[in-house]
Amino acid sequence: MRLASRTLNVAAAVALATLSVGTLAQTAVVYKATCQFIGSPAREPLADREGHTIAVAEYSCHAETGMQEGAIMTGMNIIEYDPSDGVVLSGNGVICKPGAVAVYQVIEQNSERTMTDGKVTGFTGASRGVYKLATGSMASLAGKSFTSTFRTIGGGQFLLETTFP
């Protein structure tokens, strides 16, 4: 009888844990966007040491999934390179689609170059930020934090995947 009771308790605990993990997995939402740089962000030397530079990078994205689907995002990052991997010092942007606008701020972002056969072939990185304003169909984003990953996908484009907890 005690063995049956313990087995039932263990089974109930496993079921509860599985349901909890499933609920947590359902709460994360991922939006995808294809992006490209506007112009070519030139690195400007900071003149304090070899390879220490800064660049202002403007980009535009087309959201492909979720409540942002069909939206156009325009953003700008100020990036410090020391000497090659980048850290965003400041970043922000606006996401627009008919009847909705969202404004975001990048709080932290790091990136690194990807190399193939000793040559730079792209970049990859991660960031986190917060939506400072959101209206219309994106109003639920207001005040929410997000994390993003990004990586080059060829053709001068990069893929941005944004996750909301």
Image (cartoon, helix red, strand yellow):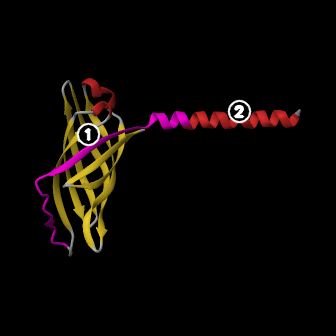
Where residue 39 appears, as percent x and y from the top left, is 10, 54
Which disc, if any, is residue 12? Answer: 2
Work out which quarter of the rendered image holds the N terminus and state it. Answer: top right
Q: Which element is circle 2 on?
A: helix
Q: Is residue 141 above or below residue 124?
A: above
Sequence-wise, the earlier of marks 2 and 1 is: 2
Q: Is residue 20 left or right of residue 1?
A: left
* Residue displayed at 12% across by 62% down: 42
> Is residue 82 covered in magenta?
no
Whether residue 134 is situated above or below residue 124 in the rendered picture: above
Q: Residue furthest right?
A: 1
Disc 2 marks a residue whose amino acid type is Ala
Mark 2, residues whose alpha carbon is within 10 Å: few (<14), some, or many (≥20)? few
Span of residues in magenta: 22-48
Instruction: Tell me which corner region of the image, top left, top right, bottom left or bottom right, holds residue 2.
Output: top right
Q: Position of residue 52 (x, y in %)?
A: 21, 69
Question: Visible in this render: residue 102?
Answer: yes
What's the residue at 23%, 33% (across, down)? 70
**Residue at left offset 53%, top offset 33%:** 23
Residue 33 sits inside the magenta stretch:
yes
Report how far apart the C-alphas of labels 2 and 1 lie in the structure.
43 Å
Residue 145: quarter of image = top left
Q: Secondary structure at mark 1?
A: strand
Residue at 69% from the left image edge and 36% from the top image edge:
13
Disc 1 residue type?
A: Tyr
Q: Which mark is residue 154?
A: none
Answer few, some or many: residues within 10 Å of disc 1's Cα (few below 14, many 20 plus, some between 14 and 19).
many
Looking at the rendered image, the disc whose residue lies closer to the viewer, 2 or 1, is 2
Q: Is residue 82 visible?
A: no
Tell me if label 2 and label 1 are in contact, CB under 8 Å.
no
Residue 63 in picture, x, y percent from top left:
25, 38
Numbered tag placed on residue 104 in the rendering: 1
